[in-house]
Amino acid sequence: MKWELFCRVIDNHGDLGVCWRLASELARRGEQVRLWCDDVRALAWMAPGGQAGVEVLPWQDIAPPGGLGEVVIEAFGCEPPPAVLADIGQADPAPAWINLEYLSAEGYVARCHALPSPVMAGPAAGRTRWFFYPGFTADTGGLLREADLLQRQQSFDVAAWRARHGVAPGTLAVSLFCYEPGALPDLLGQPNVHLLVTPGRAAAAVRALAPTLPVTWLPAVPQPAFDEMLWAADLNFVRGEDSLLRALWAGQPFVWQIYPQDDGAHAEKLQAFLDWLQAPPSLREAHAVWNGLAPGTLPELSPARLAEWQDCVHKARKTLQAQTDLATQLIRFAHEKH
Ligand code: TRH
């Protein structure tokens, strides 16, 4: 099928990061995707090689050249431009029009997944838009997982990566992709740590604290190389949406800095995720402190503690691997609704 995927970048890299992973995975499965985005600058490092089957276009208020695709996806509730809405209103048959939502482990996700939302006004009046919720349980839209992910991971050389990045044998390699967590000084004070710092906000936050421990300042790398960093580290600090999922697939212990919301809704969202994860108390405590939701300091990163966290991640990953991935579900859903 032909897919029109609309993405607006609000801030940071998750909006485009998720859309690019989805677009390229759909294309690898034989779909044809046009990705319409208002700010594609990050693709220069996230996906410098592009992907056969994905055409990237600037966000513009025009009818899609050559006719509207059979599927229209608006990512995270960004409404397509009026000319596209007019096409949706007129196309016969109507396209499968899908709102791809943010990822959450909260209970409303399963309740709202795949619900219709009839459009009452505007150029697409009379059409139906469908909610598609990614999620961690079988009654949701599932999670993005490339068909070749496991194979790529199995053939990856962890030791070579660590040597290339100057990680001395016996040190704890900790990757850092975060905003500005108040508990960052705690992490910098942990013994025997080698920090792998991603560029942007994480690097600025670390630089401001003048760390004394060994640090590798990483460049911005393509998504597959970002995944490799997560596979190579002993502990991953991730943030937002896409890197959380990648940390889960990596199977290494991780601590997630959730995207903070003004109304504080992120606290409940984090809780729901930790409940789903069946996180042990020390991992919950680390999340509370790292997200500024509880006073205190990060627990010591001892080998026994990291082994406990890893065990928890492995169990969760195994459950997820038995579920149908998002691209498979989305293709099925689009066929059904077209
Ligand atoms: O950048 P983020 O904080 O994005 C956030 C979240 O998506 C959040 O839910 C959303 O509301 C907000 O943006 C607007 O974190 P996230 O989601 O992990 O996205 C980062 C992307 O950047 C991810 O696809 C991985 C990619 N990346 C690389 O490909 N290479 C790199 O070197 C780095 C540092 C990141």
Image (cartoon, grey):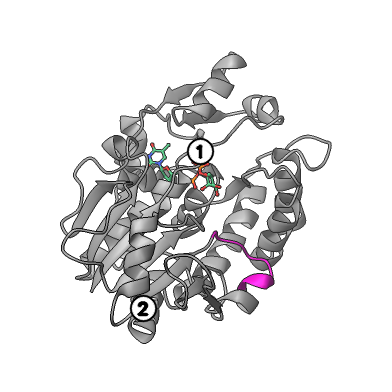
Q: Amino acid at mark 1?
A: Asp
Residue marked by disc 1: 11
Q: What residue lies at 45% left-to-right and 41% top-to-bottom?
A: 13
Q: What residue lies at 45% left-to-right and 31% top-to-bottom?
A: 198
Say above or below: 248 vs 98: above
Q: Which mark is residue 334?
A: 2
Q: Is residue 154 visible?
A: no
User: Label 2 neighbourhood size at 10 Å, few (<14), some (14-19), many (20+)?
Assistant: many
Give x and y (percent) for residue 195: 51, 29
Is-magenta flag for residue 104? yes
* Whole-number angstrom distance, CA of label 2 to CA of label 1: 28 Å
| First-in-chain label (2 vs 1) | 1
Q: What residue lies at 41% left-to-right and 44% top-to-bottom?
A: 232
User: Where does the magenta region start and end?
Assistant: 102-109
Say above or below: 194 vs 112: above
Name the quadrant containing residue 22. bottom left
Closer to us: 8 or 226 = 8
